[in-house]
């Protein structure tokens, strides 16, 4: 095999030859300051000339190259030459043997098809960082060599083990950081969703793919008492542990503000100020909604978040677009609440942008696709949730995290409907209001077949709440009784917005004991201001699981 013929194709040879050509001036220009070639090729202070590159023995050069060098020729890539570094790494190989059998390491690395491609195309190819059977990592460059029947391929392998191990350590560190962020975020999300009496809910969270740091998507379901439920979903902008930590602070704050039983826009107003205190540069979007089964509506406020989608009992899907304010953390904006019908048989979906946003698609198109998927998604909330995620093409490699919250207001019929009932009475005031309220409550609770003890406690709580409203409230006043499959709820509303509080009555006081009595006998009690002005005071009793209270 004529190695001298292929020496010009060795890495660096052409570059050195070009450099030498530039240093050697034509004879007629040697007087212009150029250095004669003979002088350029002599050692400083010596008489022995350095050999030119063309005079070097190719075999001697290749034997001393620290990289792995192999030369093969012909369509079956017969071995023409292996340098010392190659044989030291993989052992001696018989010259003239085909590569498929004699160079199994190249076969294991999948380089034989690459040799075929280089031989056919005449163009060099490079494969980066392949781990060889000797445990080292190499970058292989395959270069065509020779012409005609003597065509071959020069395989040049550089040891990049240190670089590969450093890159693997970096990837492992990034994986650990991501796992830490995912663990933190999952620990901050609700481990189990609260289960409202009148709603069926399901939620899912999918972190971004392995190349994407975890984000700040979050959701929550909060039972407010009195049959009402708060639902919230949000998205903290940014990635990593910082976004997850801010998300945890906002979620904790939402639960605290929800206990105040404020309207949705007031909750967002408080969150907006808190977001600025946490980090003025950290922006988050959020939707906070409240469902009241007595009103069959979803009252909500949005801070820069995507619209809630609601499918009614007929399968029609609508967006709850307005009102929408700027994201949390911007400050200076007065949020407002809106509402959308959510009667029996309806389904609502709250979601983050990872479900509908794509780089090659307009956001409105993504929301429209979700609307179509929701229109055809039937079944329970978890089934609907899973179908929406699949229809959006969310996979483990998805480039953004996704949170979805689905709630359904079931349409009940038959025996199940007997477990959810309502009764209301308008109170006109006067001395006859309290006795009339007690008689009404007694009749209703008897018709609902409540046990005697629960019947008496319900009548007593009704009497105290109505008396408190008559003494401290203003018309219009209304008594409402509601039962679910789990509890009895008693609520009295009036036109005064002063909220009662529990206090210790002194022995000589003639008032101040009503709320204390209600708080003592009931499972829970509370009060809130109503949207049209005034207040509502409620209490609830858990139903005994083994007693016959339903038919």
Image (cartoon, grey):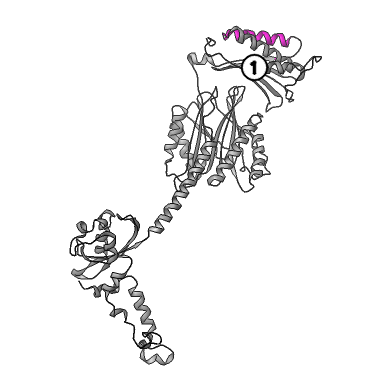
Image position, residue 329 (x, y; %) = 64, 44
Out of 476 and 155, give the one closest to the viewer: 155
User: Residue placed at 36% from the left, 84% from the top?
Assistant: 41
Query: What number of labels is visible?
Result: 1
Q: Is residue 541 left or right of residue 156?
A: right
| Visible residue check, residue 196 | yes
Query: At 44% across and 33% down in the image, what residue appears?
Result: 386
Location of residue 254 (image quadrant): top right
Q: Which residue is mark 1?
A: 522
Specify few, some or many for label 1: CA neighbours under 10 Å numbering under 14, 14-19, or 20 or more.
some
Label 1 SS: loop
Q: How far across and down, in percent of the image, does residue 396 sit?
A: 42, 42
Residue 201 in the image: state x and y as whole percent. Answer: 51, 28
Q: Nearer the viewer, residue 270 or 413?
A: 270
Q: Is residue 127 visible?
A: no
In the image, the segment drawn in magenta is 427-450
Magenta-drawn stretch contains 95: no
Q: Is 432 inside the magenta-drawn segment?
A: yes
**Would residue 226 appear left or right of 123 to someone viewing this image?**
right
State left or right for residue 439 relative to residue 421: right
Q: Is most of the magenta stretch helix, strand or loop?
A: helix
Q: Nearer the viewer, residue 505 or 81?
A: 81
Location of residue 221 (image quadrant): top right
The quarter of the rendered structure image containing the N terminus is bottom left
Q: Residue at x 26, y 69 (%)?
A: 145
The vertical placement of 368 against 539, above or below, is below
**Is 18 situated above or below 37?**
above
């Amino acid at each position: 095999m004529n190695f001298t013929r292929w020496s010009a194709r060795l890495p660096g040879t052409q570059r050195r030859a070009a450099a030498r050509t530039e240093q050697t001036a034509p004879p007629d220009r040697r007087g212009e300051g150029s250095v004669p070639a003979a002088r350029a090729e002599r050692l400083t202070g010596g008489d022995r000339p350095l050999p030119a590159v063309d005079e070097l023995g190719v075999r001697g050069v290749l034997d001393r190259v620290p990289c792995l060098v192999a030369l093969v020729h012909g369509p079956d890539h017969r071995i023409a030459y292996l340098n010392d570094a190659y044989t030291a790494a993989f052992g001696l190989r018989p010259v003239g043997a085909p590569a498929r059998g004699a160079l199994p390491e190249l076969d294991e690395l999948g380089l034989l098809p690459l040799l075929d491609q280089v031989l056919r195309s005449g163009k060099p190819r490079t494969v980066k960082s392949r781990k060889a059977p000797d445990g080292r990592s190499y970058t292989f460059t395959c270069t065509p060599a020779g012409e005609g029947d003597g065509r071959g391929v020069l395989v040049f392998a550089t040891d990049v083990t240190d670089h590969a191990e450093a890159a693997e350590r970096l990837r492992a560190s990034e994986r650990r950081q991501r796992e830490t962020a995912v663990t933190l975020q999952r620990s901050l999300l609700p481990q189990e969703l609260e289960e409202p009496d009148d709603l069926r809910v399901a939620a899912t969270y999918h972190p971004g793919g392995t190349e994407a740091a975890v984000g700040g998507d979050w959701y929550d379901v909060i039972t407010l008492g009195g049959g009402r439920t708060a639902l919230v979903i949000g998205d903290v902008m940014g990635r990593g542990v910082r976004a997850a930590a801010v998300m945890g602070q906002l979620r904790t704050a939402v639960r605290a503000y929800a206990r105040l039983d404020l309207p949705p826009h007031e909750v967002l107003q408080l969150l907006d100020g808190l977001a600025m205190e946490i980090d003025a540069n950290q922006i988050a979007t959020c939707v906070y909604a409240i469902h009241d089964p007595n009103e069959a509506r979803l009252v909500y406020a949005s801070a820069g978040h995507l619209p809630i989608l609601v499918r009614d009992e007929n399968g029609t899907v609508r967006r709850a677009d307005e009102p929408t304010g700027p994201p949390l953390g911007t400050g200076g904006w007065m949020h407002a609440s809106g509402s959308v019908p959510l009667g029996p048989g309806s389904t609502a979906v709250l979601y983050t942008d990872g479900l509908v946003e794509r780089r090659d698609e307009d956001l409105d198109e993504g929301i429209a696709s979700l609307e179509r998927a929701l229109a055809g998604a039937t079944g329970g909330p978890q089934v609907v949730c899973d179908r929406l995620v699949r229809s959006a093409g969310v996979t483990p490699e998805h480039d953004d995290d996704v949170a979805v919250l689905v709630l359904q207001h079931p349409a009940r019929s038959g025996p199940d409907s007997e477990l959810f009932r309502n009764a209301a009475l308008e109170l006109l005031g006067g001395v006859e209001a309290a006795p009339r309220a007690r008689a009404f409550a007694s009749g209703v609770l008897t018709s609902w077949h409540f046990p005697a003890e629960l019947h008496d406690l319900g009548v007593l709580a009704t009497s105290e709440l109505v008396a408190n409203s008559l003494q401290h409230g203003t018309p219009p006043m209304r008594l409402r009784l509601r039962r679910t499959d789990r509890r009895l709820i008693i609520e009295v509303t009036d036109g005064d917005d002063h909220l009662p509080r529990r206090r210790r009555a002194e022995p000589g006081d003639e008032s101040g004991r009503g709320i204390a009595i209600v708080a003592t006998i009931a499972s829970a009690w509370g009060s809130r201001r109503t949207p049209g002005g005034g207040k509502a005071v409620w209490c609830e009793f858990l139903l005994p699981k083994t007693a016959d209270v339903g038919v």
